[in-house]
Image (cartoon, helix red, strand yellow):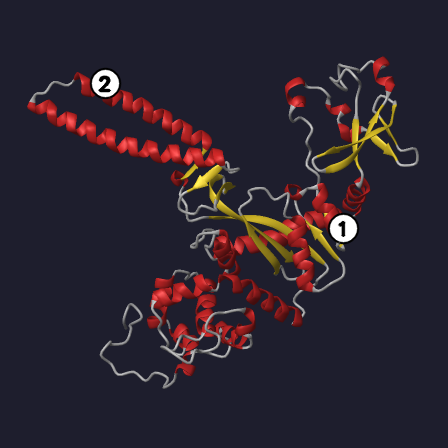
Amino acid sequence: MSEHVAGLNRDQTLIFPETLEGYVDEENPVRFIDAFIGSLNLEKLGFTHSIPNDLGRPSYDPSDLLKLYIYGYLNQVRTSRKLENECHRNVEVMWIMKKLAPDFKTIADFRKDNVDCIKGVFKEFVKFCMGLDLYGAKYIAIDGVKFKAVNSLDRNFNRDKLSYRLKVIDERVSKYLGEMEALDKEEEKAQATRELEEKLKNIMKCKEKYTDLLRKLKESDLNEVSLTDPESRLMKNRGRIEPCYNSHVAVDDKNHLIVDYNVTNAPADNCQLSSIAKGAKETLGVEHLDAVTDKGFFNFMEIKECVDNGIVPYVPEQNRWGAGWVKKTGIPTREFSSDKFVYDKGTDTFLCPAGNRLEFSYLDHAHEKKMRVYRTDACFSCEFFLTKCTRYKRGRTVWRWEHAEVIEEMKLRMRLEPWKLKARKSIVEHPFGTIKRAFNQGYLLLKGLRKTTGEVGFT
């Protein structure tokens, strides 16, 4: 008996299925991809070449190329050259493409030319899943994820980085000039002089380039510039700072399926809550929707926008005590921080920790919000004045947003329903783990905000 399982002789005649249909069983996912894409109206979704032209060489059907890309992203094959190879060796791809084998340029051009249409395909898939009752459509969790852009850290510059490099270049120029002056005109040293001249020529080219970049940054409102992908921005990603794009997703709690997504080059999340929540509500077609997210999304105006549009937000507030002047001076102390002042709606006053009442004084504006300002003359006789409560010689002031009741109602909801905040991670982190770990798609292949939005849609 043989020690190992023996394979067949390569010269032996084999009987394979006579048709491609025989290679793909009934439960194979490619059958679903084929049926779903075949049910879409690609002309309505805006895909190019949806209607064949009467003149010229026939084009590939966009539905075939769309099936190829969806299969590729599902199986961690994203580049056009690898997809071209799959068309020649992968039986599942042969089946779904009906033995078509477009070249890599055709495959790449399809993705480039139709990036704006992918969001529409995604929404059609959500509608299909809703028809199967896979969405609860009552409660969503929102979070952001960073995707590495096609831009290395060495090709991203801010003003400080450019200024430092220009300083280093000036030091090297002075060093090279000094060495050139010290050299004699002997044959050996003449060669060294020519080498220094070449180095000086190259470094002056770099100086000209960096000077031009620094000038453009100062003339614009930008704080940084990326040379390979100009729209990418520096963000913290997996413990590193690198050029990225920031994507936000809304995930339904029933089966952890994504409802809506967007892509932005803004590193912070605090201006994205209302847009992604309203997009999810519109996609689900409901009148009311609960939305929970982390404290990075906390923004007064964004929360008010959600409430005005029938969305019930659950957003923990960031603890800002200990920042700015408080960090430098230690005043006010923790027991006199602004959250320790209790508002009395009946009398429209604040009760301070020392037992004094602050009354309404005047209206003001701060950070584009209309604020009510409260003060009291009791500060001047208080034992904590200028020691623990405030450094301000005119006494302590407390600011209250004109729509502060929206935040207070949200805080009450979070106290009464703490399980919603605790469930957020288990709902929204699941798709991120699938994308980055299982699919290995934590980096982008396309450049520019518009194209990366389409690519994230495939993912």
Q: Position of residue 314 (x, y in %)?
A: 72, 47
Residue beneath the point at 48% across and 33% down: 218
Nearer to me, 387 or 372? 372
Q: Quadrant of residue 165?
A: top left
Number of numbered discs visible in the structure rendering: 2
Q: Amino acid at mark 2?
A: Gly
Res 141 visible: no
Give the mark toward the camera: 1 or 2. Answer: 2
**Would you call the spot at circle 2 few (<14 residues within 10 Å), some (14-19), or many (20 or more)?**
few
Q: Residue furthest left?
A: 187
- Picture disc at residue 178: 2
- Horizontal arrangement in the rendering, residue 174 relative to residue 69 (left or right): left
Which image quarter is the N terminus in? bottom left
Q: Position of residue 92 (x, y in %)?
A: 41, 73
Residue beneath the point at 33% across and 24% down: 170
Nearer to me, 89 or 369? 369
Secondary structure, mark 1, is helix
| Residue under pointer 1 | 307
**Would you call the spot at circle 1 few (<14 residues within 10 Å), some (14-19), or many (20 or more)?**
some
Q: Residue furthest right?
A: 346
- Horizontal arrangement in the rendering, residue 104 relative to residue 312 (left or right): left
Q: Amino acid at mark 1?
A: Val
- Horizontal arrangement in the rendering, residue 131 relative to residue 164 (left or right): right
Residue beneath the point at 67% across and 17% down: 329
Q: Position of residue 365 (x, y in %)?
A: 75, 33
